[in-house]
Structures are given as C-alpha cells and as structure tokens.
Amino acid sequence: AQSVAQPEDQVNVAEGNPLTVKCTYSVSGNPYLFWYVQYPNRGLQFLLKYITGDNLVKGSYGFEAEFNKSQTSFHLKKPSALVSDSALYFCAVREWDNYGQNFVFGPGTRLSVLP
Amino acid sequence: KAGVTQTPRYLIKTRGQQVTLSCSPISGHRSVSWYQQTPGQGLQFLFEYFSETQRNKGNFPGRFSGRQFSNSRSEMNVSTLELGDSALYLCASSFYRGQDTEAFFGQGTRLTVV
C-alpha cells in the first residue's frame, strides 16, 4: 500500500524567509506525487505534481518541490514566504490501476507565516 | 470555466436520518471522486466514479453510497447517520483517468450530525 508522511504538524516561518514543508513517501513502483493547499473553509487547491523528469518541480504561487528518490522525499519549498501562504498543506500520492484511482493524502502540515 | 460545485455547503442532520450531497464536476471532466475530511482521520477516500460506473471504493461501510449521472454529475448518500459522520465531504473531478492526473476539488459540504 502507498503511504505519505508529513513529519511536522505545524511549521512557523517569518514573512520573507524561505519555507519548507516536508513530505516522505512509501510506494511500490514509480511515485506520482502531488501537493495541495487548503485555506479555511475551502476545498483543496492543486499546487504542483511530480510525474517524471526534473527533480525540481515548479508550481503555482511561487511554490516548488524537490523530489529525492534516495531519501523518498518530496519537500515543498518557497524562497520567500508571504502571510497569505498561511494554510494547511497536503502531500499526496496517486494510486491508480485499471479499475480505479484515488489519492492517498498525508495528515497535513499547518503553515503559519508570521508578519 | 466554472470549477467543481458542491451543494449544499452546509447541512445539519439528526442521527438516524439520511443525507444526499451533490457534486457538479468541471465541464468535460468524467472522473469524480469523493473524500471525507475529519480532524481525527484526515482526508480519506470514499469512492470514484467514471462513466457512470463506480471504479474504486474506500474502506467505508455500506451506509455510504454514490452514483454518477450521464452528465458526470455525482451524488453521494449516507444513510442512518451517526455522530461520527460529521465531516467535510469533498468532491474532486479529473479530466481523465491516469496516475499523472491532478484533481480539482470543490469547496466541500460541511455535514454536522446531531
């Protein structure tokens, strides 16, 4: 079974500083990894995905993620955090076969960007 | 292009009742999935529909069911509601099926069972 771990429940960072939200995965076969963000009382918004190719993936709102196969990690990063980045972030792996598909989500990391 | 629309946004039901939630996917999207989000269990997969057929189901009791119509709109039903069914129910749609496909989520329906 596929699984995703987000080792930090909460990450605090000062505005303007770089941010990292950590994710590690356990999959059989090639990993298909995603990051989503959830703002209060909202659904999930897609940020970026890793399918294959470059280990550094660029996504929406200035976010990027670094895929590291040897460390089975897919950390989300941003060079300069904004207060508006404060939200709940989910890492996910895609499960897929000929019958069905779904995401397996990590528990989420709450990011607080302090002014 | 309109996003994924879920109705209603909020619901309050009594234990033992049943409830139906609705989801309209992004135009052209044929895969619709449902997830339950709770503080204790996080995001859990309920089921996926594609071309009016349930393709995949998560580990939920038979009280949870769903269907998809020919226009790709989907409904999920929960019968004999329990207090533990209180959650945010999220619907997601994808243009096609595949490991590389991202899904687009609606704002969710917040169900409170009292």
Image (cartoon, coloured by chain):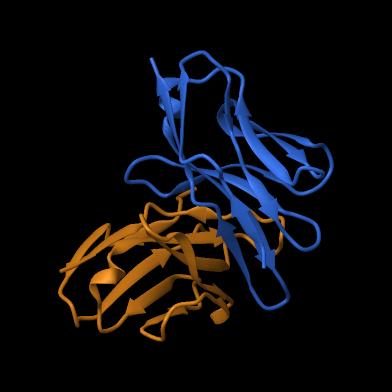
Q: Is residue B12 left or right of residue A59?
A: left
Residue shown at the point (33%, 70%) measured from the top left? B21
Q: From this viewpoint, which residue is outermost toward the right?
A: A53
Q: Is residue A12 above or below residue A97?
A: above
Q: Is residue B45 left or right of residue A54?
A: left
Q: Quadrant of residue A58?
A: top right
Which is more toward the observer, B50 or B39? B39
Residue shown at the point (55%, 81%) measured from the top left? B54
Which is more toward the observer, A10 or A103? A10
Query: Does the rendering let one see residue B97?
Result: no
Q: Which chain is blue?
A: A
- Number of numbered discs: 0
Query: Does the rendering let one see residue A22?
Result: yes
Q: Is residue B37 left or right of residue B70?
A: left
Q: Is residue B51 left or right of residue A25?
A: left
Locate residue B34, reporting x and y percent.
Answer: 46, 67
Q: Is residue A30 above or below residue A67?
A: below
Which is more toward the observer, B21 or B3? B21
Locate residue B46, reporting x and y percent.
Answer: 47, 71
Q: Is residue B22 above or below residue B15?
A: above
Residue shown at the point (37%, 46%) measured from the top left? A42
Residue shown at the point (76%, 42%) measured from the top left? A71
Q: Quadrant of the N terminus of chain A?
A: bottom right
Q: Quadrant of residue B14?
A: bottom left
Locate residue A102, reporting x and y percent.
Answer: 59, 65
Q: Quadrant of residue A99?
A: bottom right
Q: Is residue A43 above or below residue B63?
A: above
Locate residue A84, reporting x and y percent.
Answer: 41, 25
Q: Which chain is orange?
A: B
Q: Quadrant of the C terminus of chain A?
A: top left
Which is more toward the observer, A29 or A50? A29
Q: From this viewpoint, which residue is outermost toward the bottom?
A: B62
